[in-house]
């Protein structure tokens, strides 16, 4: 009999054993099926796949445990502020990243084996917005080390590096070529995706750490020379990003006034200079930048009568010319088309962003390649010749007979970005970027470090993670310490010793002269018993969990206010409506706490020998909730079988 449709969506579907599995498949499993074995349980901490998939390396499982009310805060902090502190140890922008990060962490979430991913970025936005609303600040920075670091670029990487360096005791000076901090947050992403009050609040919180100087409208290599930095600072971090857009590699593009890059288009809009666009806009891309371009174009619209100063490309190219604010009042809808080499399912832009753009009235032509910019008698583009294409080893080739011309008054290229290394040729690797080793050091340039898109254009979260690595390397360089080996799983790991210290349960010092050479103990208060930390080397997979423990739990989705094609003109309200506190807590409860005990009591309840027991409340904390009496344990492995999080392993005794 078929399962009713409503039950498919509400009942657990995971099974440990399939029909016909009456025999153990391996000799080792047959041993475990008996009464006892020589192996006893040990508690093994591993990194969850969400955290391993996060380029910033955030302790996602940790702050979800705090939001779900499982991990308790210190007595002087609310759980909301404690979650904020844990989240921002790796990434100082929870409010912003919760909105715009494409959430590679969610792609790795083991919960997808049951129904759907945990809404990690939705909970992160809640943490960030709550912190701003309540005025939470970072913990006070330590005393100054006497060293000062020059940070070139005040975007996500530069600001994150300043944050991490100041927390290590080093003063910083940020050299920013624009009039405001934020980089791509401010100049590359529209305000309806990154609200400017949230952006300003999260930047100001970093500056409030103190001893972070900012020099605006200053370009290193032009206004300030590298030699000046090397003379005046103890180390230099290059975080200049990639602010130059790539043009289309087709005839007619070069020098045509109404052909502009997506980066320049968005910068003109985000600076408030461009109030209207053209009647017919064609954007070539397929990534997130191109989606922002076409969404902005639909919101701006066009005006019918334009002089030279009103043409959008005049504003984009000039950098100083601005539209009169009154122009937007006369705007009419723009016809906007997005073309992509890739079919829709393979476009690099997130699926929901592509859907929203279509809903807003953008025409998307996928599997299409540009061939030529068609020019009019006045030298301006009148259209873009395109054709359907086939991709062979990543290279497109046109399908004969599919050529056509898309009429256009403005053509935007959003096919990639590059760095501007004017005056910095010594650092150019030949591709307009700066090389970096695994520690974020610039090879052959002692005292110079690099982070962010100037290494390789990627995600904002990647730039923030690189800034953390570079800050650690700078700290080692300034203290003349040897660089430690970076772990295989390079993230912000949960540390049980730090947690024990937080709750005043630090193990007692071990005095070898007083106690003798003890090679092992199961009750000494100077050791953490039957615990192993493999988090720096292993990521826990779903087949190590007991998925049968978890019931169907519907995901708490954020609501969105996406305007349709009829009302999109002039619609600049934020689209995402954040979760309520109750929704955020409920969503955090969907986390399966992969690789770390979440205090479900299964091992205590199912142990037939009463060998597994809860640690006394006065000695209990995250990661130390249960222990084993090895005088009673017979090695039946039931506790490991029923552990939902994979925290218990039958390894002790090997």
Image (tube, grey):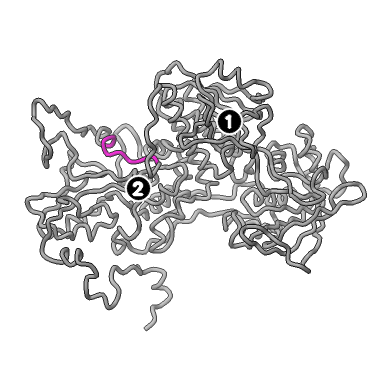
Instruction: Please give the label number shown on residue 2.
Output: none
Residue drawn where x is 45% and y is 15% of the image: 146
Q: CA distance from mark 1 to mark 2?
A: 31 Å
The one nearer the camera, 118 or 34, is: 34
Residue at image mark 1: 154
Judge the density around disc 1: few (<14), some (14-19), many (≥20) Cα neighbours within 10 Å: many
Q: Position of residue 611 (x, y in %)?
A: 11, 53
Image quadrant occupied by the N terminus: bottom left
Residue 246 visible: yes
Left or right: where does residue 70 sit relative to residue 146?
left
Q: Position of residue 279 (x, y in %)?
A: 81, 52
The front one of 623 and 482 is 482
Report the side of 275 relative to 243 (left or right): right
Give the side of residue 652 with respect to residue 359, left or right. left
Quadrant of the rendered structure where residue 174 is?
Answer: top right
**Is residue 204 covered in magenta?**
no
- The answer to whether 509 is drawn above or below residue 189 in the figure is above
> Which comes before the other along the chain, label 1 or label 2?
2
Q: Which residue is mark 2?
A: 47
Other-residue count near label 2 (Cα within 10 Å), few / some / many at <14 / 14–19 / ≥20: many
Which segment did they paint magenta?
491-499
């Amino acid at each position: 009999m078929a399962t009713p449709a409503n039950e498919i969506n509400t009942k657990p579907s995971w099974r440990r054993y399939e029909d016909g599995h009456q025999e153990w498949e391996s000799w080792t499993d047959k041993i475990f099926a008996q009464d006892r074995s020589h192996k006893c349980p040990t508690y093994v901490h591993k990194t969850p796949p969400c955290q391993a998939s996060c380029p910033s390396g955030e302790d996602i499982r940790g702050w979800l445990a705090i939001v779900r009310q499982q991990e308790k805060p210190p007595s002087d902090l609310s759980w909301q502020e404690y979650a904020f502190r844990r989240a921002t140890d790796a990434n100082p922008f929870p409010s912003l990243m919760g909105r715009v990060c494409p959430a590679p962490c969610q792609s790795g979430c083991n919960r997808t084996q049951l129904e759907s991913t945990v809404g990690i970025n939705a909970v992160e936005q809640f943490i960030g917005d709550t912190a701003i609303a309540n005025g939470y600040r970072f913990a006070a920075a330590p005393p100054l080390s006497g060293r000062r670091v020059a940070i070139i670029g005040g975007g996500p990487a530069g600001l994150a590096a300043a944050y991490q360096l100041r927390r290590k005791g080093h003063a910083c000076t940020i050299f920013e070529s624009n009039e405001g901090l934020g980089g791509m947050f401010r100049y590359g992403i529209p305000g309806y995706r990154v609200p400017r009050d949230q952006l300003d609040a999260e930047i100001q919180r970093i500056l409030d750490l103190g001893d972070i100087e900012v020099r605006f409208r200053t370009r290193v290599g032009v206004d300030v020379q590298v030699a000046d930095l090397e003379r005046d600072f103890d180390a230099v971090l290059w975080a200049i990003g990639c602010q130059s857009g790539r043009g289309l590699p087709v005839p007619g593009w070069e020098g045509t006034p109404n052909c502009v890059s997506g980066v320049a288009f968005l910068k003109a809009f985000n600076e408030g200079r461009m109030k209207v666009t053209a009647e017919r806009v064609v954007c070539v891309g397929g990534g997130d930048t191109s989606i922002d371009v076409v969404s902005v174009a639909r919101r701006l619209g066009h005006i019918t009568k334009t002089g030279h100063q009103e043409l959008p490309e005049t504003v984009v190219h000039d950098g100083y010319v601005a539209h009169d604010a009154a122009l937007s009042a006369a705007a009419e809808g723009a016809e906007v088309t997005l073309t992509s080499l890739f079919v829709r399912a393979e476009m690099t832009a997130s699926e929901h962003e592509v859907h929203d753009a279509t809903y807003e009235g953008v025409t998307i032509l996928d599997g299409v390649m540009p061939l030529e910019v068609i020019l009019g008698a006045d030298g301006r583009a009148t259209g873009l010749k395109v054709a359907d294409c086939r991709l062979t080893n990543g290279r497109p080739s046109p399908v004969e007979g599919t050529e056509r011309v898309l009429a256009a008054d403005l053509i935007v290229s959003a096919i990639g970005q590059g760095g501007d290394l004017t005056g910095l040729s010594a650092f150019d690797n030949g591709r307009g970027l700066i090389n970096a080793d695994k520690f974020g050091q610039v090879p052959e340039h002692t005292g110079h470090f690099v982070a962010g898109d100037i290494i390789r254009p990627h995600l904002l979260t990647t730039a923030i993670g690189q800034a953390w690595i570079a800050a650690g390397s700078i700290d080692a360089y300034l203290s003349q310490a040897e660089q430690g080996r970076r772990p295989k799983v390079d993230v912000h790991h949960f540390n049980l010793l730090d947690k024990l210290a937080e709750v005043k349960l630090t193990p007692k010092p071990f005095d070898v002269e007083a106690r003798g050479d003890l090679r092992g103990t199961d009750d000494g208060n100077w050791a953490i018993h039957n615990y192993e930390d493999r988090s720096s080397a292993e990521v826990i997979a779903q087949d190590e969990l007991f998925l049968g423990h978890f019931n169907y739990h519907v995901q708490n989705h954020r609501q969105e206010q996406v305007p349709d094609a009829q009302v999109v003109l002039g619609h600049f309200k934020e689209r995402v409506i954040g979760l309520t506190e109750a929704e955020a807590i409920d969503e955090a409860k969907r986390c399966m706490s992969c690789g770390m005990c979440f205090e479900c009591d299964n091992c205590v309840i199912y142990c037939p020998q009463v060998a597994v027991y809860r640690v006394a409340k006065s000695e209990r904390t995250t990661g130390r909730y249960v222990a084993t009496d090895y005088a009673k344990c017979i090695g039946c492995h039931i506790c490991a079988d029923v552990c939902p999080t994979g925290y218990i392993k039958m390894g002790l005794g090997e």
